[in-house]
Image: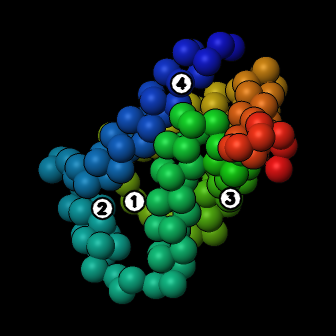
């Protein structure tokens, strides 16, 4: 995979994350009244420390996704750790109700994250992160590694 394709993939992933977040706020009106009642109860629950942690994971994931465009080594590591961590957090959080559009966008987001994860692990792009980080650690005056 070349740099251009990698950056396109990161942009698609980043845009899709925003679409998935927006889709979470779309509630279809044709849901069963019992499901709508449950959804209202979920929205009325108090904010917990676990919710704050989950929000932090999402925000750090967005920051890592943006930093991937600049080949930051910490972003690669953060992204590789956060994707499985966010999946675990989702399962620990327990059952919840979501609309079909929300489920669809989340599934596509997981697919894109998996593709990006595989690219970061198994293609020559992983060497770009190391080369970029090594060249940025050179002394500005002498050009020698710091």
Point out the tag, 2 or 3, that comes first from the N-terminus. 2
Point out the tag, 1 or 4, that comes first from the N-terminus. 4
Q: Nearer the viewer, mark 2 or mark 4?
A: 4
Residue at which label 3 appears = 85
Q: In which quarter of the view is residue 67 placed?
A: top right
Point out the tag, 1 or 3, that comes first from the N-terminus. 3
Q: Nearer the viewer, mark 1 or mark 4?
A: 4
State whether residue 2 appears in this view: yes
**Label 1 Cα neighbours within 10 Å, binned few <14 / some 14-19 / many ≥20:** few
Q: Nearer the viewer, mark 2 or mark 3?
A: 3
Up/down of 31 relative to 35, above or below: above
Q: Are marks 1 and 2 in contact (CB under 8 Å)?
A: yes
User: Which colour assignment does the render follow?
Assistant: rainbow
Rendered location of residue 98, percent (x, y)? 37, 54
Q: Are marks 1 and 4 in contact (CB under 8 Å)?
A: no
Alpha carbons under labels 1 and 2: distance apart: 7 Å
The residue depicted at 61 percent of the width and 57 percent of the height is: 86
Residue at which label 4 appears = 7
Residue at the front extreme of this rendering: 141
Q: Nearer the viewer, mark 4 or mark 3?
A: 4
- For the residue pair 68 and 22, the one nearer the viewer reads as 68
Q: Are marks 4 and 3 in contact (CB under 8 Å)?
A: no
Up/down of 70 relative to 98, above or below: above
């Amino acid at each position: 995979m070349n740099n251009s394709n990698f950056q396109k993939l990161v942009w698609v992933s980043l845009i899709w994350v925003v679409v998935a977040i927006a889709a979470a706020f779309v509630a279809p009106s044709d849901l069963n009244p019992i499901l709508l009642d449950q959804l209202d109860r979920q929205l009325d629950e108090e904010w917990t420390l676990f919710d704050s942690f989950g929000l932090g994971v999402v925000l750090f994931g967005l920051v890592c996704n943006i930093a991937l465009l600049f080949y930051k080594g910490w972003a690669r590591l953060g992204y590789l750790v956060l994707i499985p961590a966010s999946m675990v957090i989702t399962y620990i959080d327990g059952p919840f109700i979501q609309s079909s559009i929300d489920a669809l966008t989340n599934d596509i987001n997981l697919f894109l994250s998996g593709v990006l994860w595989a690219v970061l692990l198994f293609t020559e792009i992983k060497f770009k992160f190391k080369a970029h980080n090594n060249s940025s650690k050179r002394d500005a005056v002498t050009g020698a590694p710091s």
